[in-house]
């Protein structure tokens, strides 16, 4: 077995037992990248191998000196390209920021560095995290490791595909309306979005500030808990970061309390959800019952309003967040401009892709005087109602289970000209963002050889129990070790 | 034509002296090299350039709102005002649109011996923009540079109700406002450095009417004087337009200091849509009663209260009390001097007379003055004890102002002690009478003016050190007997 096939936790254990070195792990990842990246295109930037290796040597030295170590020291990892890194370009998947080097590291970048993990690259994404297929990247689309004619989901499609393709041990993504969970579901990996405020957004290029949250893409739930241990915690540089005592999520992961009550919203198994998806998720729910979990059908009455509310709030905030890309200080600047207004117009016209322009225009409209009350303000009210729906559900349920995405991965190009159909991908993921709740997607089965994800949503800051429950569920589902078969360079592609 | 009246509302921006910016730790120092007081947050760089509120700025604003008798908001919230301009790094300004910190307050001014209240519509906290630098004018400049040092400096905006009826009232209001904010020690309010900026909304209407006429917004007034002159000019211009049967165009106008006129800048027909919405990066904070009370307890005595106290406690004339209390530093100086020499009117005369004269001539602020209250008191005591004459004291005072030397030392070193010894004076007077027989004769002929000449001669002989009262006494005695 190749080293890159190990989970992050297994690799860390092998390091601890001195069976392998950090350099071996890094070499193995680079070997895998060389072999399959052409088929996946999950990276925007791959770090120079020598640089990563010299960092691995340093980490190895400190490992041998027996420093008291964080658990993922020496493990290679990848960051989504909207997370700032001092020494690697951060493009946000956009021509607007091509070649942009931020003068600082994001909070999570710092934390992962302190923990001794080794950055190997920056992953591909929909431009400014706007999209559900990674086809909106200004550079190239990422391909689904399970079938390269299909999309990996988005916007953290690069991160999800790289984890599925074993090109990285784990990756970070960002989740504004499902951008971690949906690609995780489509690529058959674990995607977790923490409670809003648990992980600092300092250094995350903003899409919609009240919804954005950094999340993890990992091979299994244990890896997820270990990464969360590193990145969670209060940061005074983010006013929305919640000051609370730090928890240890990976400790006692296997010790789940005896019985939980889980709500299943009937609205999430209706029209528009693929039969195979329903079947796979229901199978997961049955597994829960086998271990004594109480399953109850519930109603999530305002679910149908979540998506429109989300698309108003998110576009409104993004229209403001993206105003700074004006060609004045940094990034792309049109060479054709004659004066200041021309500079704004042409820079934004040439620098942004069509989906970004569409959302900026929608958001600008929603905030305009005369429309503010009817659109933005109403969307905020819906948001409050959704939050209250959840509060009510959580009065007598521990978790809610629903599909992560109504469909499995769709074909490349299939929905790219139909934004509304594309937006429907987020129908089950946006409620957790609107309510700020923690939510995880776990692989639960397959349809036509493509993975299906099951989503568990929990109470605010109830990550510990949510992960314990997810860990148990994952072990019952027994799909986590099924991996995609990607033809390596030089091999004949039989499909 | 019916009688017209002027209606003016002011929008005043004041930079707060918090030391650091509103949402990051950068310095707010004036005059640093361009783009040196900046960081990713105030530059609005992509990615997690998140604002963290400077609590001091919030407290300063609450203080100001309390001092302006405003109703204070129960929540501290911030909104984004979206527009594109090259000096605005994020493409939006963080301000308080939905819930300004304070509303519905007032400021008292004294005009023509009466007290008038100018209503305050609102006061809110916001961040300043950067500054554009052009070569020549903005139109002719081949390119422009941006300095972001000022971007993110905390500003309070104070908007008055349209209660101001003349350029003079506007000037008095601004003076009083500056005085209040300086008493609070939250801003230095220097119009020349831009730490206090004022725009005026000006219209005219039939006297006593309810409706406001079409207004113009006047900008670029960089001193109290130009606010006064700008409004005067603009009011006259509008009256002329109406007199000629025209209509006042609603527009933004620019005060041209060198030419002393206002010029049209841009039309106001299309109102800008700033698409304000609550800033999702700054969760609302409760403004608790306890917090407000803590801040209120720290409020100093304000100019209006001090003015009234000076009238009562020191029995000063209105004019003296007004001038002294207009500046916190000046009235502090005055009161400290009184603790050493308790003669309110005398001290007031010296502070308002000699001290202000020298400060103005040297364009110096009282804090930087060489003379300390204790030294002034010492000087006044020397006059009181007849050690020196009032006239000599002025010379001594000038020297104190220059060198900061102790008055006793100056008097001693330069031998300025007053001659009050009668024997010594009689000798000198005898001499003077001998040498001026003509004046003596004139005096006896009834020309009482001759007395003045003789006194002058005595003073000349003694280099001004003779005690004038004594000289008069002795001289009169000698001449009349």
Image (cartoon, rainbow, N blue to C red):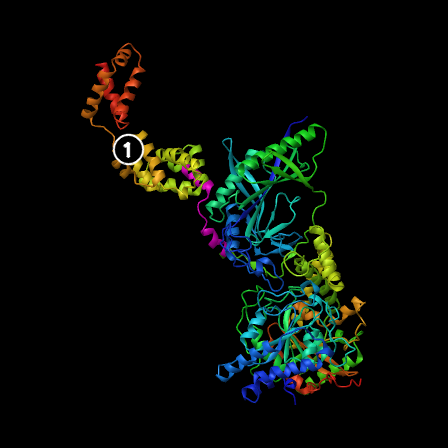
Write down the region rendered in magenta.
B291-310
Q: Residue at x 62, y 58 (%)?
A: B279
Q: Is residue B199 above or below residue A295?
A: above
Against B276, residue B373 (above or below) is: above
Picture coordinates of residue B331, whole percent (x, y): 41, 40
- Position of B327 compared to B455: left or right? right
Q: Residue furthest top?
A: B445
Which residue lies under the disc numbered 1? B384
Residue B369 is at least partly visible in this image = yes
| Residue A325 at x, y percent in the picture | 67, 59
Is A169 rendered above or below residue A337?
below
Q: Quadrant of residue A290?
A: bottom right
What SS does tag 1 mark? Answer: helix
Query: Where residue A473 appears, x then y in whole percent?
Result: 66, 84
Q: Quadrant of the C terminus of chain A?
A: bottom right
Residue B258 is a magenta residue? no
Residue nearer the viewer, A438 or A139: A139
Our reading of the magenta stretch's main secondary structure is helix
Q: Is residue A44 left or right of residue B154?
A: right
């Amino acid at each position: 077995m190749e080293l890159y096939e190990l989970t992050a936790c297994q690799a860390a254990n092998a390091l601890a037992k001195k069976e392998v070195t950090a350099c071996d792990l890094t070499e193995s990842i680079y070997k895998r990248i060389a072999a399959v990246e052409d088929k996946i295109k999950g990276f925007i930037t791959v770090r120079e191998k020598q640089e990563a290796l010299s960092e691995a040597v340093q980490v190895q030295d400190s490992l041998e000196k027996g420093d008291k170590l964080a658990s993922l020291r020496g493990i290679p990892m990848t960051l989504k390209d909207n997370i700032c890194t001092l020494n690697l370009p951060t493009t946000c998947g956009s021509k607007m920021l091509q070649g942009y080097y931020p003068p600082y590291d994001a909070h999570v970048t710092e934390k992962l560095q302190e923990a001794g993990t080794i950055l190997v690259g920056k992953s591909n994404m929909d431009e400014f995290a706007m999209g559900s297929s990674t086809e909106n990247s200004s550079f190239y689309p990422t391909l689904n490791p399970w079938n390269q004619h299909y999309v990996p989901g988005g916007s953290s499609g690069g991160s999800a595909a790289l984890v599925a393709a074993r090109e990285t041990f784990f990756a970070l993504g960002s989740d504004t309306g499902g951008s971690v969970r949906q690609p995780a579901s489509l690529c058959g990996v674990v995607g977790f979005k923490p409670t809003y405020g648990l992980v600092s957004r300092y250094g995350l290029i903003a899409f919609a500030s009240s919804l954005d949250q950094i999340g993890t893409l990992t091979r299994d739930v244990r890896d997820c808990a270990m990464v969360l241990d590193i990145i969670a915690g209060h940061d005074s540089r983010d006013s929305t970061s919640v000051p609370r005592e730090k928890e240890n999520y990976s400790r006692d992961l296997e010790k789940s309390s005896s019985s939980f009550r889980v709500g299943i919203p009937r609205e999430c198994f209706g029209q528009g959800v693929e039969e195979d998806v329903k079947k796979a998720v229901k199978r997961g729910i049955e597994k829960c019952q086998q271990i004594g979990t109480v399953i109850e059908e519930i109603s999530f009455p305002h679910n149908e309003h979540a998506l429109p509310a989300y698309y108003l709030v998110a576009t409104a905030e993004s229209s403001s967040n993206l105003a700074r890309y004006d060609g004045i200080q940094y990034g792309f600047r049109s060479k054709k401009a004659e004066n200041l207004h021309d500079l704004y117009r042409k820079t934004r016209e040439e620098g942004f892709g069509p989906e970004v322009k569409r959302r900026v225009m929608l958001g600008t409209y929603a905030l305009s005087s005369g429309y503010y009350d009817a659109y933005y303000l109403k969307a905020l009210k819906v948001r409050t109602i959704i939050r209250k729906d959840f509060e009510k559900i959580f009065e007598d349920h521990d978790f809610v289970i629903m599909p992560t995405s109504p469909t499995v991965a769709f074909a490349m190009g299939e929905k790219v000209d139909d934004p509304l159909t594309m937006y429907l991908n987020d129908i089950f993921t946006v409620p957790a963002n609107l309510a700020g709740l923690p939510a995880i997607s776990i692989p639960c089965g397959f349809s036509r050889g493509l993975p299906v994800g099951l989503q568990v949503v929990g109470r605010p800051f109830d990550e510990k129990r949510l992960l314990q429950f997810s860990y148990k569920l994952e072990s019952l589902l027994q799909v986590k070790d099924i991996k995609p078969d990607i033809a390596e360079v030089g091999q004949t592609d039989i499909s | 034509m019916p009688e017209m009246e002027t209606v003016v509302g002011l929008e005043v921006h004041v930079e707060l002296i918090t030391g650091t910016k509103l949402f990051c730790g950068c310095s707010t120092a004036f005059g640093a090299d361009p783009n040196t007081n900046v960081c990713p947050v105030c530059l609005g760089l992509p990615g997690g350039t998140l604002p963290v509120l400077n609590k001091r700025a919030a407290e300063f604003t609450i203080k100001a709102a309390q001092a302006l008798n405003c109703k204070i908001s129960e929540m501290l919230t911030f909104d984004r005002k979206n527009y594109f301009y090259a000096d605005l790094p994020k493409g939006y300004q963080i301000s308080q649109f939905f819930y300004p910190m304070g509303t519905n307050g007032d400021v008292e001014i004294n005009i023509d011996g009466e007290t008038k209240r100018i209503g305050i519509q609102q006061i809110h906290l916001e961040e300043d923009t950067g500054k554009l630098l052009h070569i020549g004018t903005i139109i002719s400049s081949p390119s422009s540079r941006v300095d972001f040092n000022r971007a993110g400096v905390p500003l309070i905006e104070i908007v008055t109700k349209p209660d101001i009826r003349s350029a003079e009232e506007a000037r008095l209001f601004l003076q009083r406002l500056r005085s209040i904010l300086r008493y609070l020690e939250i801003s230095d309010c220097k119009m020349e450095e831009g730490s206090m900026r004022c725009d005026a909304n000006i219209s005219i209407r039939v006297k006593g009417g309810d409706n406001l006429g079409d207004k113009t917004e006047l900008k670029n007034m960089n001193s109290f004087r130009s606010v006064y002159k700008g409004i005067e000019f603009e009011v006259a211009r509008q009256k002329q337009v109406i007199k000629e049967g025209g209509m006042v165009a609603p527009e933004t106008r620019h005060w041209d200091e060198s030419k002393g006129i206002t010029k049209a800048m841009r039309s106001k027909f299309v109102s800008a849509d700033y698409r304000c919405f609550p800033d999702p990066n700054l969760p609302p904070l409760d403004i608790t009663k306890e917090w407000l009370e803590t801040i209120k307890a720290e409020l100093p005595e304000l100019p209006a209260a001090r003015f009234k106290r000076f009238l009562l406690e020191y029995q000063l004339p209105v004019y003296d009390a007004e001038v002294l209390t207009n500046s916190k530093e000046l009235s502090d100086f005055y009161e400290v001097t009184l603790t050493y020499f308790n003669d309110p009117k005398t001290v007031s005369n010296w502070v308002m007379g000699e001290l202000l004269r020298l400060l103005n001539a040297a364009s110096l602020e009282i804090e930087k003055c060489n003379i300390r209250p204790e030294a002034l008191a010492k000087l006044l005591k020397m006059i009181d004890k007849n050690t020196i004459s009032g006239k000599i004291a002025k010379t001594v005072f000038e020297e104190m102002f220059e060198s900061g030397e102790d008055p006793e030392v100056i008097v001693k070193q330069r031998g300025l002690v007053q001659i009050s010894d009668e024997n010594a004076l009689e000798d000198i007077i005898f001499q003077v009478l001998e040498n001026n027989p003509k004046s003596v004769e004139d005096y006896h002929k009834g020309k009482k003016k001759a007395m003045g000449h003789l006194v002058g001669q005595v003073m000349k002989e003694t280099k001004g050190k003779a005690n004038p009262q004594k000289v008069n006494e002795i001289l009169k005695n000698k001449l009349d007997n």
